[in-house]
Amino acid sequence: MKIKRAIQFLSLACLCVLLDASAWAAPSDALPTQQEQIREGSKKYAQAKDWRGKLAACVDLIDSGVLTRGKPIKLLKDLFQTDVSVAKGDLSGESIAFVYFSPQIVTKDASVAVGFIGWYLQVESNAQGNISGYHISNTHK
């Protein structure tokens, strides 16, 4: 009986020590803020050397919850800088925007058809300017 009580006491003492230690954890152990995640994600995207790195950075932003439904579509400019192409709207209301991970072929002659190349992110927003849907693809039809 004494051994059982001693084990219970030690278990309770260990639990108290663990709870006390977690209450005094250093602020550096805290999760990064949304602004820090945006800054780090944008930096990782900007430093990517090719489409693979840009695609990986984009997937990381989605996985971490930085880029998700309900967030303002204007966030695209903060994350992907100049790689954002607006197909409809102006990123303040209902919009469709693309982020191309590879440079696109540009032509000055409107009569010449040019296809899109590589992977891209397509993002749609609702009338309030919040992301309502997105997808990543490499098919252009």
Image (cartoon, rainbow, N blue to C red):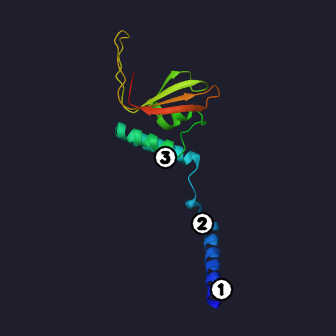
Type of the residue with mark 2: Ala
Residue shown at 61% from the left, 79% from the top: 11
Q: What percent of the width, then of the height, locates residue 94?
A: 60, 24
The amino acid marked with disc number 1 is Arg
Figure quadrant of residue 73: top right
Give the label, 1 or 3, closer to the camera: 1
Determine contact: label 2, label 3, CB under 8 Å. Answer: no
Residue 129 picture location, percent across and down: 61, 29
Give the label on residue 75, or none.
Answer: none
Residue at image coords 50%, 26%: 97
Q: Which of marks 2 and 1 is in front?
A: 1
In the displayed structure, 5 sits above or below 21; it is below
Residue that label 2 marks: 25
Instruction: Check disc 3 and give the amino acid type.
Output: Glu
Quarter of the image with the N terminus is: bottom right
Q: Which residue is drawn at 57% across and 55% down?
A: 31
Task: Kindly identify which numbered label has been placed on residue 40.
Answer: 3
N-terminal-most mark, 2 or 1: 1
The residues bearing labels 1 and 3 have C-alpha atoms spaced at a distance of: 51 Å
Which residue is nearer to you in this view: 119 or 28? 119
User: Residue 38: horizontal and vertical position, in percent?
Assistant: 53, 43
Q: Nearer the viewer, residue 82 or 56?
A: 56
In the image, farthest residue toward the bottom: 2
Q: Which residue extends farthest front?
A: 1
Q: How crowded is mark 3: few (under 14 residues within 10 Å), some or many (20 or more)?
A: some
Identify the disc placed on residue 5.
Answer: 1
Q: Within the image, what quadrant is residue 7 found in?
A: bottom right
Q: Is residue 49 above or below residue 85?
A: below
- Dot 2: what SS? loop
Answer with mark 2 or mark 3, whichever residue precedes in sequence: 2
**Cβ–Cβ under 8 Å for marks 1 and 3:** no
Report the front residue among 78 and 3.
3
